[in-house]
Amino acid sequence: MSDLFILLVCLFLCGYILPSIILSILQMNHINKELKKPAILLESDDYIQAGEYSIASLKLSIAQKILEGIMFVFWVSVGFTWLQGLSVEINNNHYIQSIAFVLSYIIISDIIQFPFAFYETFKLDKKYGFTHQTLGLFLSDTFKKLLITFVLGSLIAFLLIFIIEQFEHWWIVGFFTLLCVVILANLIYPTIIAPMFNKFTPLDDENLKARIESLMNKSGFKSNGIFVIDASRRDERLNAYFGGLGKSKRVVLFDTLLDKISSDGLIAILGHELGHFKHKDLLKNIGIMAFVLFILFFVVGHLPVALFDTLGIDYDGAGVLVTLILIAPIISFWFMPLIGYFSRRAEYAADEYGASLSSKHCLANALVRLVNENKSFPSSHPAYIFFYYTHPPLLQRLKALDYDI
């Protein structure tokens, strides 16, 4: 066992797995302490239920991280050597072998995580009344995701493998290529990918539609329609969003939101979302993501060849791409605080804009309604917020909106 192998394993475990587990434990301890205090924002029973659900979710997350650490050790010790040998037997064509190697790694990793998704849906979410998922719908969603992974993953893998093997400074070309893929994905998701999982129906409430269109006109937002999706087929959570880029932009409302939020509250929520459009937050988010992606490609592009020997991977397109996927969690984990910082600032600005289109009172009441319906625990540990929260804690958002808690 080489020193480089030990260093790599320690870096992954101590630089990613262990901090993630510590943050989850801090959050669990914080929630347990808060549960001993009087309930805030939620009714007492809902407050306790929200806390218990959060703790159960965190325990599941810890189990997932432990498994992720075990699988990392497996892959870098014997897994990649075994998988690479298996892919060689599939076909004599170099690119088919390479794509098979990359996709096998991704799909096997997804299959290993499948029991956690199954448990979360049919045990955890069922227990707390969040999900309406049937086994058939769950398996159908899983199959569609695997199919999308196989089709799009094959195309992207081929493209990146070709670039890695043909360009000296492949990491620069690869970065720009993948960034273009991400932008393209944002363009096609609302009209091609999302309808594979949900039914999109044009909003038929003419009064509400007129109010939303008036709101969009004030903000200069042009969309190709206002749609309601059948989110209640899966769970009771409430949401609304503006999806897509360019001409593919659309307003999407969960049917659960229409059932449980007043028209004034819905307008306030959409006003907040329009604030993101007005401030060009989607473009800013793509810029931040591009920066993190660039760092990832830069790091992998300058790894020593000896590292690939340690992993038991050939230093070729497939080997480099799998290594990039392997260390991506470490890079993204330590950049999450930066992403979260800018995202939370954007949320405050969007709240301010949304309140200007309706009122602080309407937006604050809508946010309180959301937290009650979604049973979100309203308090978190500062370190957990620092690393994971893309939205400010609700208590801080309400304070900024002059809401009397």
Image: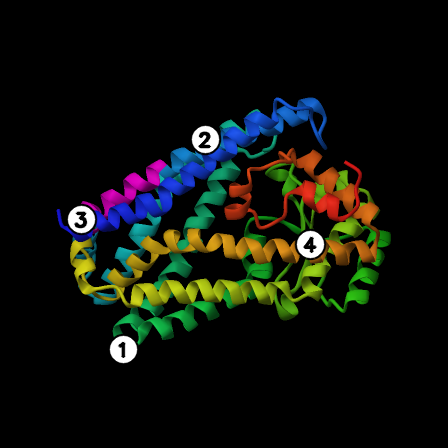
The CA span between labels 4 and 1 is 44 Å
Q: Which residue is mark 4?
A: 348
Q: Which residue is mark 3?
A: 82
Q: In the displayed structure, does residue 258 sit left or right of residue 336? A: right
Q: Which mark is residue 59?
A: 2
Mark 3 and mark 4 lie on one chain; the one further toward the N terminus is 3
Span shown in magenta: 66-80
Q: In the displayed structure, does residue 19 sit left or right of residue 36? A: left
Position of 158 relative to 394 (above/below): below
At horizontal 31% and vertical 41% (from top left) the residue drawn is 69
Q: Where does the image place residue 79, in percent across and percent down from the top left?
A: 21, 47
Q: Amino acid at mark 1?
A: Glu
Q: Which residue is mark 1?
A: 168
Camera-side residue: 41 or 341?
341
Q: Amino acid at mark 3?
A: Trp
At horizontal 30% and vertical 61% (from top left) the residue drawn is 321
Disc 4 vs disc 2: which is toward the camera?
4
The CA span between labels 3 and 1 is 29 Å
Q: Where does the image place residue 68, in percent across and percent down from the top left?
A: 34, 41
Please identify the residue farthest to the right as the structure is shown: 207
Position of 78 relative to 184 (above/below): above
Q: Under tag 4, what secondary structure? A: helix
Disc 4 vs disc 1: which is toward the camera?
4
Camera-side residue: 282 or 107?
282
Mark 2 and mark 3 lie on one chain; the one further toward the N terminus is 2
Mark 3 and mark 1 lie on one chain; the one further toward the N terminus is 3
